[in-house]
Amino acid sequence: MSPQVRHLIGAVAGSAALPLVYYLTEAGARALRAAYAAFRPAPAGLGYLAAVAAIVVLLAAWSWLSPLAALACGLPLTAAAALFAFDLDVALDLAGRLPSFAVPTGQPVGALAGEPPGALAGVTGLYAVIGVLLVLSALLPRRRRSILGE
């Protein structure tokens, strides 16, 4: 496989993973918040965030072939995190324009208290952590990124 094809596949995979990571992170944050407020365990929140972790691990592992996989997902998440940190009103306005998707609980993401999708995860810094980890995994030297130790 040529490097151009690997980079193209990486960019497409990272771009396809971005909405999954965005909405699953938000669903996990909401499930954790609801469980915290009700003083009960949050297996759904753990499940959502475990799915996000699995996607992030796959994208970071792909980085040894093409760093574009991690960058295509990590850079927009990092930018969203910066927007939530520096201009919350603009971030909430942009998030409010995103479609809401129903999560397995039947509650659409963004339906709690009229918050747009991404608001809770953005305000709590989850997008910053995930985005920065993905960007750093892509920027590491190739010899450190390789799981084969080449």
Image (spheres, rainbow, N blue to C red):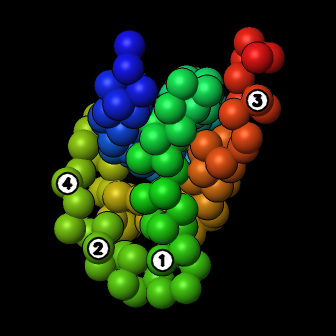
Q: Amino acid at mark 2?
A: Leu
Q: Residue at x 47, y 83 (%)?
A: 88
Which circle's residue, 3 or 4, is located before the other in the chain?
A: 4
Label 3 sits on what residue type? Arg
Q: Are marks 2 and 1 in contact (CB under 8 Å)?
A: yes
What secondary structure is marked by label 3?
A: helix
Image depth: mark 3 or mark 4 in front? 3
Query: Residue 101 has which mark?
Result: none
Q: Are marks 3 and 2 in contact (CB under 8 Å)?
A: no
Where on the picture, by quarter, is residue 42?
Answer: top right
Q: Of tags 1 and 4, which is closer to the observer?
A: 1
Question: Circle 2 — which element?
Answer: helix
In the drawing, does residue 23 fall left or right of residue 147? Answer: left
Amino acid of disc 4: Pro
Inspect this view and state whether residue 48 appears.
no
**Gap in angstroms between the C-alphas marked 2 and 4:** 11 Å
The mark that comes first in sequence, 2 or 4, is 2
Q: Residue at x 76, y 17 (%)?
A: 150
**Residue 99 image label:** 4
Disc 1 crowd rating (10 Å Cα; few below 14, some 14-19, many 20+) is some
First along the sequence among labels 3 and 2 = 2
Reading the image, the residue beneath label 1 is 83
Q: Residue at x 43, y 59 (%)?
A: 76
| Residue at mark 3 | 143
Mark pair 3, 4: CA separation: 40 Å
Disc 2 target residue: 94
Q: Amino acid at mark 1?
A: Leu
Question: Mark 4 falls on what kind of element?
Answer: loop
